[in-house]
Amino acid sequence: MIKKLFIILAGVGLASQANAACVIDLSTPDGGTTPTTLTTAPLNITIDAGAPADTTLFIPGAEANTSAQGTPVTYINCVTGELYGKETTAMLGANLGGGLFATNVDGIAIKPLWNNGGNPAFGKFPSQAPMSFSTPTGRFSYGPNSYFRIELYKTKPTLTLNPGPNQVLPGGIIAYNWVSTTGIANFGQQLQIGAINITSTPSCTFDSNKQVDFQLVTGAKLKAGVDRPLDFDITCITDYGHYSATAAITTSTPSADGNYIKVRDSSGNDDKMQIKISDSTGAQLPLNGSRSEQKVNIASNAPAEFKWTARLEPVSPTVSPSNGNFSAAAEIVLQVN
């Protein structure tokens, strides 16, 4: 005997209805434009090696704004609670806090910012927040006056740079505003920067006034020539590890051949005595700056030392200056690389 059991399977099907999601609006009367790329121009930054690290004030000149959005980027069908936010791309390094991100130059950080065009305050990256509407769905827009900004900061007292310009960041997309989910595929606005390069200038200290005292000079001493040391140095801080210093000398009162400094005696005569300047090797220096002495490969914050000699001589052995004080002046020109 065969018996059959009929089984009826029953249940309740629950159809899921996905929450509405923002959709870009290009066609309604209030519609806008497609997601937009806003761009900053390339930057060439010059920084003083002696400038302190400061994460509150950006490097002078190290800032740039994009143009304003113009035609809005606008979305419809957005729901309360749907997320929007700001994010950076892999072009930037570690998040250093305070909106700062590491760059390719250790000690230089970049801060991308966004402004809605109606508020003096800038928004830092990254961030996210839920949308809120008074109706079930609403419109979300990046307004016509919104724009991006970048600022660069020195975060370490000393940088480590290679000779010549150093690239802080290449050109490319570094940040974006997103809608619904964080991926860059959902960007509403994105920030494209031009390449950023940095050059550092040495910060130097030296004695800007140097006096050579020949003291009491007799006629016999003058005829033999009186030598006095003309020692000076310059100390520079550099972000390149080492520096070079070049020194030359000029005067507004040169001798006719340009090799001596004229000396004015107590009677105002400048044709009785003259001063010759020799460099650290004993070679005579012309007084028009055409020849110089160079100190190379000096470690940062170490002095470049010059040991020159000033020699007082008579213009002619047959003439004598007036008794009393005498003086002469010249200028040492220092160049640092």
Image (cartoon, helix red, strand yellow):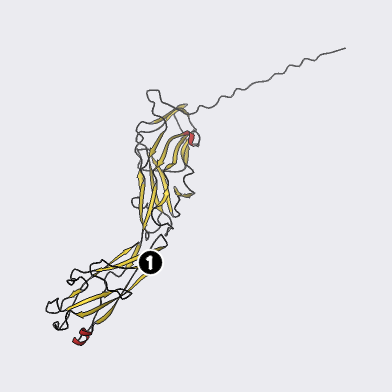
Q: Is residue 80 left or right of residue 318?
A: right
Most foreground residue, 252 or 44: 252
Residue 247: where, in percent of width, then height? 30, 68
**Residue drawn where x is 36% and y is 51% of the image:** 45
Seen from this angle, which residue lies furthest right? 1
Q: Is residue 226 left or right of residue 320?
A: right
Seen from this angle, which residue lies furthest left? 267
Counting labels gives: 1
Residue 318: where, in percent of width, then height? 14, 84
Is residue 240 shown above or below 129? below
**Residue drawn where x is 48% and y is 39% of the image:** 128
- Does the image show residue 275? yes
Is residue 58 shown above or below 244? above
> Tag 1: residue type?
Val
Is residue 135 shown above or below 264? above
Residue bearing mark 1: 296
**Residue drawn where x is 41% and y is 40% of the image:** 192
Indicate the quadrant containing the N terminus: top left, top right, bottom left or bottom right: top right
Is residue 1 shown above or below 280? above
> How many residues crowd mark 1 within 10 Å: few (<14), some (14–19), many (20+)?
some
Residue 173: where, in percent of width, then height? 44, 40
